[in-house]
Image: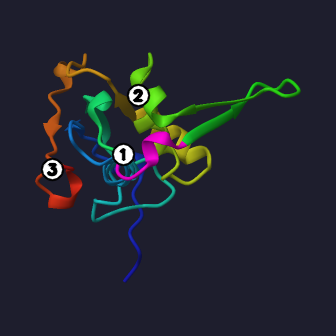
């Protein structure tokens, strides 16, 4: 028996809508990364982009456990002494709260060309509306998967 490997013509991509309100960030990011990669499919092929297109709404209402809201995120401007930082809470209260979810998913994917291609299949929105109604996305209820996915 031979190992089956998918070809680009065999790939069937779906659209999935996830509501992030009240969901724990790490658990949500791991589910999204698995869906983007295509590991939930029986014919998973590691070197192909065979995952689904994922839409995440209400990213500003994500739950973060422990003291991770005070955890600093660092970046460097490229100039001497140009290190800067912001806490997770400051990012969530700021102009682009969806970046917290995007970075969490990005860091759960392998660091190669394929993961950069997979990240183009992720759309994260801070509010409850999204412009992808024409794709008729299937709703994935992450809260019902496991009771630990939500935080009371």
Q: Is mark 1 on a helix, strand or loop?
A: helix
Residue denoted by label 1: 9
Residue denoted by label 2: 92
Mark 2 nearby-residue class (10 Å; few <14, some 14–19, many ≥20) = many
Q: Nearer the viewer, residue 116 or 98?
A: 98
Q: In screen coordinates, is 33 left or right of 52?
A: right
Mark 1 nearby-residue class (10 Å; few <14, some 14–19, many ≥20) = few
Mark count: 3
The magenta-colored residue range is 65-71
Q: Which mark lies nearer to you, 3 or 1? A: 3
Q: Are marks 3 and 1 in contact (CB under 8 Å)?
A: no
Q: Is mark 3 on a helix, strand or loop?
A: loop
Q: Do the residues labelled 1 and 2 touch (CB within 8 Å)?
A: no
**Percent of width and height locating residue 64:** 35, 45
Q: In screen coordinates, is 3 left or right of 109?
A: left
Q: How far apart are marks 3 and 1 (CA)?
A: 33 Å
Q: Is residue 96 above or below residue 106?
A: above
Mark 3 nearby-residue class (10 Å; few <14, some 14–19, many ≥20) = some
**Percent of width and height locating residue 151:** 21, 50
The earlier-in-sequence mark between 3 and 1 is: 1
């Amino acid at each position: 028996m031979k190992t089956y490997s998918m070809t680009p013509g065999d790939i069937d991509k779906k659209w999935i809508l996830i509501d992030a309100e009240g969901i724990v960030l790490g658990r949500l990011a791991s589910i999204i990364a698995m869906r983007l990669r295509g590991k939930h499919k029986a014919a998973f092929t590691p070197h192909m982009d065979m995952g689904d297109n994922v839409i995440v709404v209400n990213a500003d209402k994500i739950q973060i456990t422990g003291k991770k809201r005070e955890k600093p995120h660092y970046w460097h401007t490229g100039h001497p002494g140009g290190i800067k930082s912001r806490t997770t809470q400051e990012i969530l209260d700021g102009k682009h709260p969806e970046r917290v979810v995007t970075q969490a998913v990005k860091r759960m994917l392998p660091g190669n060309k394929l993961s950069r291609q997979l990240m183009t299949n992720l759309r994260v929105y801070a509010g409850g509306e999204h412009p992808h109604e024409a794709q008729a996305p299937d709703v994935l209820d992450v809260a019902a998967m496991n009771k630990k996915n939500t935080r009371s």
